[in-house]
Amino acid sequence: VSGEQALAQAREVDLKRARGETLGKLAGVPIGLKDALATRGVATTCGSKILTRNGKGWLPPFDATVVSRLKAAGAILPGKCNMDEFAMGSSTENSAFGPAKNPWDTTRTPGGSSGGSAVAVAAQMTPGSLGSDTGGSIRQPASFSNVVGVKPTYGRVSRYGLVAFASSLDQIGPFAVDVRSAARILEVIAGQDERDATSIDAPVGAYEAACERSVKGTRVGVPEEYFAAGLDPEIAASVRASIDALANAGCTIQPIKLPHTDYAVATYYVLATAEASSNLARFDGVRFGMRVESAGANLTTMYGDTREAGFGAEVKRRIMLGTYVLSAGYYDAYYLKALRVRTLIRRDFEEAFKQVDIIATPTSPVAPFRLGERTGDPLAMYLADIYTLPASLAGVPALSLPGAPTPASSGRPPLPVGVQLIAAPLDEERMFAVAAAVEAASPARALALPALA
């Protein structure tokens, strides 16, 4: 919690209002920040012990671009949100500081890796927050926590100041209580940044205004691969109901094919781990964070001891996987082949968007699962991201918003369900327009959080 900073920011907004100055789009609005975003003078740990020293987190000497833009818009930044260590996970159980808990049922996960950012909004701590999405780390926790979460087009938002996991996949985006709020936050943080060579030189859309647009005549594609074996029937029914609502709003619904969907999990876990192996080499106990001093140790031993003590099990697993697929003799068999399949997945979307304007799918094949339920089975954890990974690999924008919850059963409360909307590159305006239409018809709008009812 950055209490003094938040109060100072709030006083500044009050002073500007008293002076009659023009206020920013987020003046006075508290926004939580995933702890992978650099914040000047405020601890940034990425949920890892390796970015702590003497019990204190690393203090960046600069703000991430998105943090600077939030401040310029008058947002209040009350603190940092828990996350899976270095954004590697789907349940926020890999954090060195303990798991985040789903406010709809605290025995269950809120998703990950941006679980804390989703919880901050779901539990009404803040009306908005920022997360990062590499393979679904905004959309899946948004789905599990009954909030809106947006992954923009790759390059739409600057990654400067985001601690890198997989640089060709990472994107920063907002969580919010509703579609319009998410659109406004994205308007603030989007735009080219000369400090990020991958940021796109294209005008920022009128995302909030797009929420008022008619969707009549919009062609909505429904990929058969996303409604196959493995999808919880209750989730399928909820998503189908949202698609029916779009039909009632004047959209045209048509089936489409995304034939390489089944290869997304394998492709992602080759490419993402390879990039992670490279990006995380900088955490070596020399430049920042913790250092393990071993008696009489040489430099190599110090590196090894520090990384052994500082990284958690999942991060070590992914570094080893990534190093393996990049190693001599395996590079062509794994890494280059995964790059080729990524191209095929991207082409699937290119062909689909010649036929339709938007794609509607479930966000996750399962409802929020119990804490500890999948930690012993990494493959089961990875497969929970099967519907979010393809859009990440293709670099296209996607969001998750609440659909009808699962029915209560056997003492289990209703659980959140996410509807995923995927758009063509840089077509966030259309995505928000369709999302607003789904939201207007969603019974999730009337839900009250049990703890806050």
Image (cartoon, helix red, strand yellow):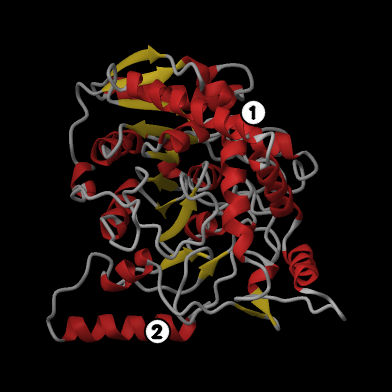
**How many residues crowd mark 2 within 10 Å: few (<14), some (14–19), many (20+)?**
some
- Quick check: 294 left or right of 97? right
Q: Which mark is residue 7?
A: 2
Q: Amino acid at mark 2?
A: Leu
Residue position for label 1: 333
Q: In this rendered view, identify the residue nearer to me: 246 or 159.
A: 159
Q: Position of residue 416 (x, y in %)?
A: 54, 40
**Contact (Cβ within 8 Å) of mark 2 with mark 1:** no
Q: Residue sitting at 48 percent across and 33 percent down?
A: 404
Number of numbered labels in the structure image: 2
Q: Secondary structure at mark 2?
A: helix
Q: Amino acid at mark 1?
A: Ala
Q: Residue furthest front?
A: 328
Q: Position of residue 245 (x, y in %)?
A: 34, 25
Q: CA distance from mark 2 to mark 1?
A: 54 Å
Q: Mark 2 or mark 1, which has the lower sequence index?
A: 2
Q: Residue sitting at 14 percent across and 86 percent down?
A: 19
Question: Viewer-nearest of labels 2 and 1?
Answer: 1
Q: Which mark is residue 230?
A: none
